[in-house]
Image (cartoon, helix red, strand yellow):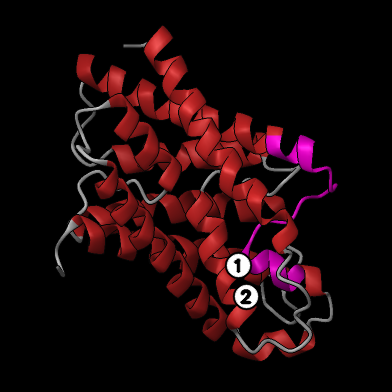
Amino acid sequence: MLHSAFFGELLGCLVLILLGGGVVAGVLLKQSKAENSGWMVITAGWGFAVMMAVFVAQAAGSPQADINPAVTLAKYLLGGVYHSFGEVLLLWIAQVIGCFLGAVLVWLSYYPHWQYTDNAHFKLMVFSTYPAMRHKGSNFVTELIATTLLIVFVGALISYGNQLPFANGSLPYVFGFAIWGIGLSLGGPTGYAINPARDLGPRIAHALLPIKGKGSSDWSYAWVPILAPLAGAVLGFVLIRVFMF
């Protein structure tokens, strides 16, 4: 159990949120040394978070290192990796738990800073995505496009790797740059969840943790960063099948 796909996905997602949510906390929370350092820092931090999370997930027993329910779903649809939907559901549970635990560690890491931050939206954004302009239809489309692109990247790397294998250990770096690029180009409207567990697990943590002045966990928006990435996984699967293999 402690060296398995379940534990690997859980631990990888914990690292994903600890570093990814951590960089958002550093930029948004008051009296942090990284306060106001901007979107470039946030997107770079998320890119590094994905890179290190993949390494950790693989080392802990998950060779696929999906760390994202949308990626797991796309691989299931493509076939050859996961043989039952029950296996997919089990990994989804691990991913959500890992993201929840990572968010709790971010809260602890920045514990003294929450009381000095008056903006409830900033506090929520440390945990989950929050759109720059609230238009749920457009927000859904943005997340759909960004996640579809992520899945196409996965397919392209699989296809390219079959023809000219990457050097051992290089793929996590490639995925880190992919996440950085998606964030820079498409993250502005919604904060680019592109990962249902990345949003859901920390949003649950936000709802449960005793954070003074935290405000609403914004559950009325939560369906967008959950369903849009899953829809993007399906659309990405279709595009891979049509154009790649």
Q: Secondary structure at mark 2?
A: helix
Residue 12 or residue 42, whichever sits in front: 12
Residue 203 is tagged as 1
Where does label 2 land, which residue?
A: 206
| Residue 99 falls inside the magenta stretch | no
| Residue 186 appears left or right of 182 | right
- Residue 151, disc: none
Q: Is residue 59 left or right of residue 38?
A: left
Residue 193 appears in the figure: no
Question: Mark 2 to mark 1: distance in Å?
Answer: 5 Å
Estimate the x, y position of residue 161 in percent, counting from the top left.
25, 22
Whole-percent x and y of residue 87? 25, 48
Residue 58: percent from left, percent from top: 22, 52
Graded by Cα atoms within 10 Å as few (under 14), some (14 to 19) or many (20 or more), the crowding at tag 1 reads many
Q: Are marks 2 and 1 in contact (CB under 8 Å)?
A: yes
Q: Does the image show residue 119? A: yes
Residue 125 part of the magenta segment: yes
Compared with 95, 154 (above or below) is above
Region rendered in magenta: 122-140
Q: Taking 63 as reference, is 182 left or right?
A: right
Instruction: Inspect the image, locate mark 2, and give the three-letter code of the amino acid beneath it.
Output: His
**Farthest residue, direction top:** 243
- Graded by Cα atoms within 10 Å as few (under 14), some (14 to 19) or many (20 or more), the crowding at tag 2 reads many
Between residues 195 and 169, which one lies in front from this camera angle? 195
Question: How far across and how far down the image is residue 106, in percent?
Answer: 53, 76
Q: Tag 1, which secondary structure?
A: helix
- Give the amino acid type for the residue marked by disc 1 in the picture: Arg
Residue name at image x 70 percent, y 64 percent: 125
The residue sitting at 14% across, 64% down in the picture is: 3
Q: State the residue at coordinates (55%, 43%).
A: 194
